[in-house]
Amino acid sequence: MESITKNRQPVEALRAMVARAYGPQEVCDAGEDWVSELSYGWFNVTYRIRLRSGAQVVLKIAPPPDVEVMTYERGAMATELAALRLIREHTKVPVPTVDFADQSHELCNADYFFMTYVDADNLNAIRDTLTGTEISAYDEALGTVTHELNSIPGATFGPLVGPGESTWRAAFLRMVEELLGDGERRGVDLRHGYDAIREVVAAHADSLDEVTEPRFVEWDLWPGNCLVRDGRIMAIIDHERAFYGDPLMEFGFAGSESGAYGDSTAFISGYGHRPFTTAERTRRRLYNLHLALIQIIETAFRAHTDTEQYDWACERLSETVALLGE
């Protein structure tokens, strides 16, 4: 996926990073076919690198400092490293192992880290080749994995690396306001008034008060961030958007209130969630509104060259506003 946030580096910089992480003896000779860019992903640039020993690793580099990112994306790499540590410490969910992280900006103008390479297929990339039964099985497995991730407790609501809020209502309202502030600053047309969106959220904010325990929320766990092989989930990747909040905000539940996000039936079955209450349905609609706002506003920050995502997300926003009765 193309985005101005992808911080591609020259080959000599990549070689220097490999040497710092693994030692100069692991740097392949110039001219060898040892590095390739992994094409999936919307935010960070990611390289697959072969070391001289033959081992395969992945290098992930944060956006360049002169490219403005959305407020919730600031410090995203630190969030991802914290998420990976939490997942490995508290669950059995498979994730890559971090080999080396560097925040010095001595070799590169941004943070970067190396992790193990997982030899598996991106679930989104192969989804069209799967049968309905296979897709349902993977969706159910994603539900199971997500439930385990949500078992990790937090001390406060909000970012993994702080600062947090004492209530979920305060944390979620801050998340929405940050998005709206980003959109207003860039002059993004939501096809709705910004204050009208604020009013919709405020009118249903009472439903957020039911959530009293901060839980780890992966949030961006869609098929594109799932690596699979032989019917099994081999790894979950791209954890930079994780936070402590309401598990119902997980992407897998989005289809329960909008078929445009897919069918959530198998995911919910794997998760083991009971039928939603009225308040839970309201919260899920608020979360779909939040998701649509991100999908609309990020097109300006990513400098998209077409309006496909923007148009689609504007439809989702209008759909969700209507569901909320506004």
Image: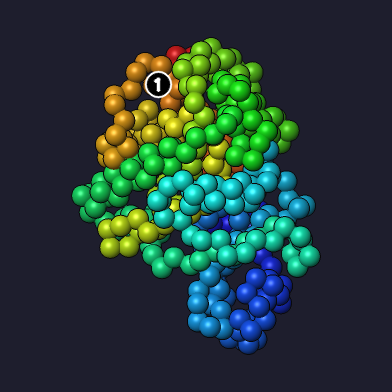
Q: Residue at x 53, y 51 (%)?
A: 84
Where is residue 242? Give x, y as percent: 54, 41
Local SS, label 1: helix
Image check: 106 left or right of 307?
right
Comparing 162 with 12, the one in front is: 162
Q: Quadrant of residue 159?
A: top right
Q: Residue at x 46, y 17 (%)?
A: 210
* Residue most extreme to the front: 89
Where is residue 322? Give x, y as percent: 45, 19
Q: Residue at x 29, y 26 (%)?
A: 274
Image check: 228 left or right of 55?
left
- Which amino acid does the dot numbered 1 rest on? Glu
Image check: 153 left or right of 161?
left
Relative to 116, say whether 93 is above or below.
above
Comparing 180 with 239, the one in front is: 239
Quarter of the picture holding the N terminus: bottom right
| Residue count near mark 1 (Cα–Cα under 10 Å), binned few <14, some 14–19, many ≥20 | some
Which residue is tagged 1?
Answer: 280
Q: Quadrant of residue 233?
A: bottom left
Residue 17 shows up from this direction: yes
Q: Residue at x 66, y 56 (%)?
A: 62
* Residue most extreme to the left: 133
Relative to 70, say whether 59 is above or below.
below
Image check: 99 left or right of 135?
right
Comparing 17 with 166, the one in front is: 166
Q: How is the image coloured?
A: rainbow
Where is residue 223? Give x, y as percent: 40, 50
